[in-house]
């Protein structure tokens, strides 16, 4: 484990200068995945999971969202082209004005779209997402495996020393109890490495979106001290932290708080929405457990190249997890 001061020394300096921030500091581990060939007994992203041969591989029974496309008629295609030309003509010479539809154009546009979510103007197809039941079920995909010895910030309960994240790679909208979510359905497992002898060979994903299939990566974990988003601090304390950061040539919310990328523990950033309290069904305020990121070596696309954050109950990790996409 890399020492905290080797990774983000500015955070420790800020805490020394503004000790009132200390109660808000949380330990975190930056996972730093890099393309590689991990084994089933390693911490990794997208590698083989330490899954007992005698234990059935889990499946998701949906329903899942599937994209359905419908070709526009020639008449409707020409009508949309005409609407677009007329809008551009009305806007000509007024670069800062908005594109506007007449009432007649709006009615025609609504009739052609007929509730579709989008229009592919390369193929002139209407695109809809429709729920489709999964029978006999979609096999989950192994996404992340962490050994407690590599990632102390994973906070595994007594006994299990391996944390595993699997997900259904199909799209799921607004899962029960999940906040602002349109993406994979996540399941988290905890087990003891010593209890696994023979390892199961999981089924190969079929017709799964490439954006939800992580490339195998090894990890280079590094410990950090993480501080909260300014909006998660009292206003006066946030102002003091920001003033210190500016005096030292940086920004609190960009360089010293809510470290980004793949992460265990720490604080969530709120770069797309206002801070959102995520409470467990038992009433306890959940804490950020894991952050899974888009792009880079794992080559995922979560939401719209965002972060998928997994929140868990601090009182009982067996309670249902909460998801948030930013």
Image (cartoon, helix red, strand yellow):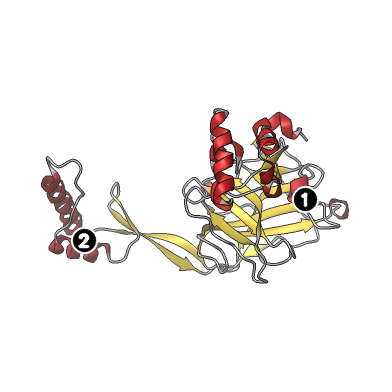
Q: Badges 1 and 2: C-beta atoms under 8 Å apart? A: no
In the displayed structure, 96 sits above or below 67; it is above
Numbered disc in front, either 1 or 2:
2
In the picture of the structure, the residue carrying the numbered disc 2 is: 109
The answer, for residue 299, to whether it is visible in the render is: no
Residue 21 appears at what percent x and percent y?
A: 66, 45
In the picture of the structure, the residue carrying the numbered disc 1 is: 50
Comparing 325 with 287, the one in front is 287
Q: Which mark is residue 178?
A: none
The answer, for residue 286, to whether it is visible in the render is: yes
Residue 51 appears at what percent x and percent y?
A: 77, 54
Query: Which quadrant would residue 102 be assigned to in this image?
Result: bottom left
Query: Which quadrant would residue 92 be assigned to in this image?
Result: top left
Numbered disc 2: secondary structure: helix
At 67% from the left and 49% from the top, the residue drawn is 24
At 19% from the left and 59% from the top, the residue drawn is 76
Q: Which mark is first along the chain, 2 or 1?
A: 1
At 54% from the left and 43% from the top, the residue drawn is 239
Numbered disc 1: secondary structure: loop
How many residues crowd around disc 2 within 10 Å: few (fewer than 14), some, or many (20 or more)? Answer: some
In the displayed structure, 186 sits above or below 272; it is below
Q: Quadrant of the N terminus?
A: top right
């Amino acid at each position: 484990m890399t020492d905290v001061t080797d990774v983000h020394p500015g955070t420790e300096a800020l805490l020394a200068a503004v000790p009132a921030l200390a109660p808000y500091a949380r330990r975190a581990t930056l996972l730093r995945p890099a393309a590689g060939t991990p084994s089933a007994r390693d911490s990794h992203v997208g590698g083989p999971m330490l899954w007992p041969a005698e234990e059935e591989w889990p499946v998701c029974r949906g329903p899942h969202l599937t994209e359905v496309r419908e070709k526009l008629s020639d008449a409707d295609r020409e009508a949309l082209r005409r609407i677009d030309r007329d809008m551009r003509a009305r806007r000509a010479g007024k670069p800062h004005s908005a594109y506007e539809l007449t009432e007649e154009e709006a009615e025609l546009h609504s009739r052609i779209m007929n509730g579709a979510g989008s229009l592919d103007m390369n193929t002139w197809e209407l695109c809809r997402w429709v729920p489709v039941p999964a029978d006999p079920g979609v096999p989950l995909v192994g996404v992340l495996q962490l050994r407690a010895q590599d990632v102390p910030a994973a906070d595994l309960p007594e006994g299990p020393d391996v944390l595993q994240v699997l997900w259904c790679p199909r799209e799921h909208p607004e899962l029960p109890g999940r906040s602002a979510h349109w993406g994979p359905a996540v399941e988290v497992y905890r087990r003891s490495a010593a209890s696994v002898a023979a390892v199961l060979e999981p089924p190969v994903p079929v017709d799964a979106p490439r954006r939800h299939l992580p490339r195998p990566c090894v990890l280079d974990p590094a410990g950090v001290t993480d501080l909260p988003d300014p909006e998660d601090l009292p206003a006066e304390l946030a102002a003091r932290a920001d003033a210190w950061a500016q005096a030292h040539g940086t920004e609190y919310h960009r360089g010293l708080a809510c470290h980004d990328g793949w992460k265990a523990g720490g604080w969530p950033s709120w770069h797309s929405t206002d801070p959102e309290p995520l409470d467990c069904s038992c009433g306890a305020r959940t804490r950020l457990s894991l952050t899974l990121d888009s792009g880079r070596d794992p080559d995922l696309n979560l939401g719209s190249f965002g972060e998928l954050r997994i929140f868990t109950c601090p009182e009982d990790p067996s309670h249902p997890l909460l998801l948030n996409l930013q």
